[in-house]
Image (cartoon, helix red, strand yellow):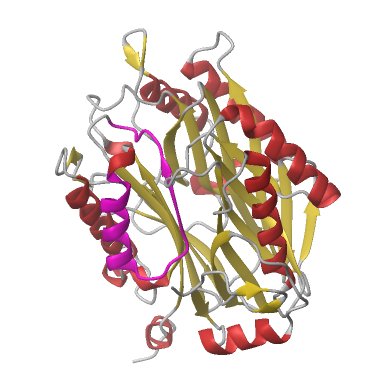
Amino acid sequence: MSGELKVKNGRGSLSPDRVLLGGDSREAAAESIGENHSGSPFLQVDQHHSVVKYDGLTRLALMVTPTCGGDFRDEAWETVSMIRTILRQQPEPMALTMQTVFVADAANVPIAQKLFEAYFGDEMPLTLFVVQPPCGGVGLAVEAWAISTRTVSVEYFGPHLVTVEHDGIRWVHASAGAIHLAGRSAYQQAVEAFDAMEKRLKAVGVPFQDVVRLWLYQGGITENEGETERYRELNRGRTDFFDRIDFSTNPLASHTDGRGIYPASTGIGTAEHGLVITSLAVQTEREDVGILSLENPRQTSAFDYPKEYSIKSPKFSRAMAIRIGDHLTTWVSGTASIVNSETAFPGDVVRQTEQTLDNIESLIGSANFSRLGWPDAGATLDDLAKIRVYVKHPEDFEKCREVCERRLGAVPSVYAHAEVCRPDLLVEIEGVAFSSLEADSISKQEGGD
């Protein structure tokens, strides 16, 4: 299978699953990696990665899962070793900027944290430990992002804040850290987490309205707290915080029809009764950079959901698109089998997975971008650089994976067991797509035909 480990006795290469935008062909990339290979021991790890080249830089999306067996320390060490091997085999120097570590047992988080801190030292990427057991029975799996440093400046401000600057654009990865229950309600956790995130961003000159993507990991997401579901209380806390944030003042925002503007978001359950949130913000004064929040014609906007789903509706967009020069990055929110505002195909994980992918395809398609005012933009499922798939029931993993592999082909993926935000939802999928803008449409917008 493409992307699988091909290193033994210090010889071989790790070929990417996908090379997107301005990259070389997969074969050329694999040959280049092989030429720069400096030698590696045999590692028992399943790895998949995409290479994305645009705007004079290179990004890697990596998915790494150990297959060595043994105890958790062995798995964690193999995982870190494989990440190191992938980075060292690239034809240019790379730095890890953010990683999400999916852990089966919360008791093992301190072990992984110490190992990562010992390896990365002062260049520790923003690292989230999420208690969501990886599908397949292993102790951990890692999704990581890396970037070439030949033309990029990466600064590490401790374990919860990393900034990346390139050609007048600044990306800021920030986390509020883990907010545990400790007698506080889900609403109080949400308010505390967002307040902490705001302070962390302000420390490096980022107002909260510059945030374009959020991830919310909530313990017991579908459990009741008093007479109210915990996820609904999370939404109430988020809404109350957002009431004082005017995202329309983001200087990069495209205003087409007066729609509400909110960051893309994933809200997903974990096995710990706490809350972990993280964010991505973008800042620039470049005139060829802009953002567009996307809604799906197949679905009611989350912020317009009726009160039966939440006292205060979830405040997020279905996706956030960022155009930089002649390319497009589309961050897809956590997406499920929802049509209009109703769950489709309750109890059927295969049809729910199909519907979820249909929803993503419609969301990022050129027709939807044109409907929202960007006729030169759009993406397909083939443009996805990576996906995360959250599966509610372990026994549904293989069925869900079969659909994803049939529809998406070889795309770096991580599958984790997690409660989705509604009891009748069996799967949720998120991802990020990279695509090129259409030159013909651009010329027409600028006064062509």
Residue 245 x %, y %: 54, 36
Segment tinted magenta in the rendering: 396-422
The residue closer to the viewer here, 173 or 249, is: 173
The residue closer to the viewer here, 376 or 171, is: 171
Screen quadrant of the C terminus: bottom left
Left or right: 328, with 197 as reference point = left
Dividing the picture into quarters, in which one does residue 297 lie? bottom left
Inspect the magenta stretch and tell me whether residue 404 lies in it: yes
**From what the image shows, is residue 81 above or below residue 149?**
above
The residue closer to the viewer here, 387 or 303, is: 387
Residue ID at (72%, 44%)? 161
Residue 47 x %, y %: 55, 63
Residue 318 x %, y %: 36, 50
The residue closer to the viewer here, 358 or 284, is: 358
Inspect the magenta stretch and tell me whether residue 222 lies in it: no
Left or right: 430, with 168 as reference point = left
Residue ID at (52%, 28%)? 241
Left or right: 41, with 192 as reference point = right
**From what the image shows, is residue 245 above or below residue 152?**
above
**From what the image shows, is residue 105 above or below residue 144?**
above
Residue ID at (31%, 21%)? 311
Q: Is residue 205 visible?
A: no
Dividing the picture into quarters, in which one does residue 354 lie? bottom left
Screen quadrant of the N terminus: bottom left
Residue 221 x %, y %: 40, 26
